[in-house]
Amino acid sequence: MPDDRDLLLVVDVQNDFCPGGALAVPEGDRVVPVINALGSRFAHVALTQDWHPADHASFASQHPECRPFETIELAYGAQTLWPDHCVQGSRGAQFHAALALPQAELILRKGFRRAIDSYSAFRENDRATMTGLTAYLLERGVTRLYLAGLATDYCVAYSALDAAAAGFAAIVIEDACRAIDLDGSLAQAMALMKDAGVSIAKAGDLD
C-alpha cells in the first residue's frame, strides 16, 4: 500500500483528451473511475493540466502549410503538430467532470509558454525549462511516484522518464492510462520506460 513517501500523479485527465474532445485519446474517459478509486489510497495526489494559449506554437492552426500530426522543427527540435486543444479557460481544458480527487494538493499547469510545448510534468520540451515539480516533491519527502492519466505514450511516459531521471521510483499504472498510439508511439514509449527502470503495474497490484 502507498505510504507518506508516495504520490499519485494524475496526468491531463481533461475534456479535450476524452471522447468528444479536440484531441481525444481512445477510451480516455475510462481512466476516470480507476483513478478515482486509486486516489482514495494515497495521502498525496497531484494533477497536471495542459494549459495552452490560443496561438500555441504546437497547434497545426499556427502553421497554415501543415496539417495536424505532422512533425516540424521548432527552435528546440522536432515537434508534432496537434489540433488546437486545452486552450486556457476553455471547456476543453477543464478536468473531466467525473474526476473526483478533492484531496489533490497541487495542480501543475504546463504548456502555457507559447513557443514551447510541454509533455512532461517535470520539464518542457526544450528539455531545459523546468516546472519546479522536482523541488516540490523533494521538499515534501516524496520518493516514489505512481503515474496515471493521458496519454500513456506522451505526457505520462515523458513524466515517468523524467521522474526516473530525477531519482524517483516511477510506476506507471497501465490500466489507469490510455494511449494515442501515433505511428507506433505506444510501443516505443513502453520500451523507453522499461529501459529507464520505470515499472509498469496494474491498479490491482496496489491491493
Image: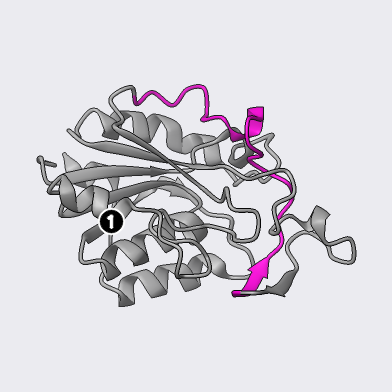
Residue 71 forms part of the magenta stretch: no
In the picture, which quadrant includes the N terminus? top left
Q: Quadrant of residue 143?
A: bottom left
**Type of amino acid at the residue the image marks with label 1:** Thr
Q: Is residue 100 left or right of residue 55?
A: left
Determine which residue is flagged by label 1.
134
Residue at the spot 40% in from the left edge and 74% down from the top edge: 191
Q: Which residues are magenta?
A: 76-101
Q: Is residue 91 left or right of residue 143?
A: right
Residue 103's place in the image compared with 117, above or below, is above
Q: Position of residue 170 (x, y in %)?
A: 25, 59
Indicate how the structure is coloured in the image: one colour
Residue 197's place in the image compared with 12, above or below, is below
Residue at the spot 74% in from the left edge and 49% down from the top edge: 55
Q: Position of residue 179 (x, y in %)?
A: 53, 54
Residue at the spot 57% in from the left edge and 42% down from the top edge: 51
Residue 2's place in the image compared with 105, above or below, is below
Residue at the spot 51% in from the left edge and 59% down from the top edge: 154
> Is residue 172 in sight in this rendering?
no
Secondary structure beneath label 1: helix
> Is residue 132 in sight in this rendering?
yes
In the picture, which quadrant includes the C terminus? top left
Q: Position of residue 113 (x, y in %)?
A: 59, 53
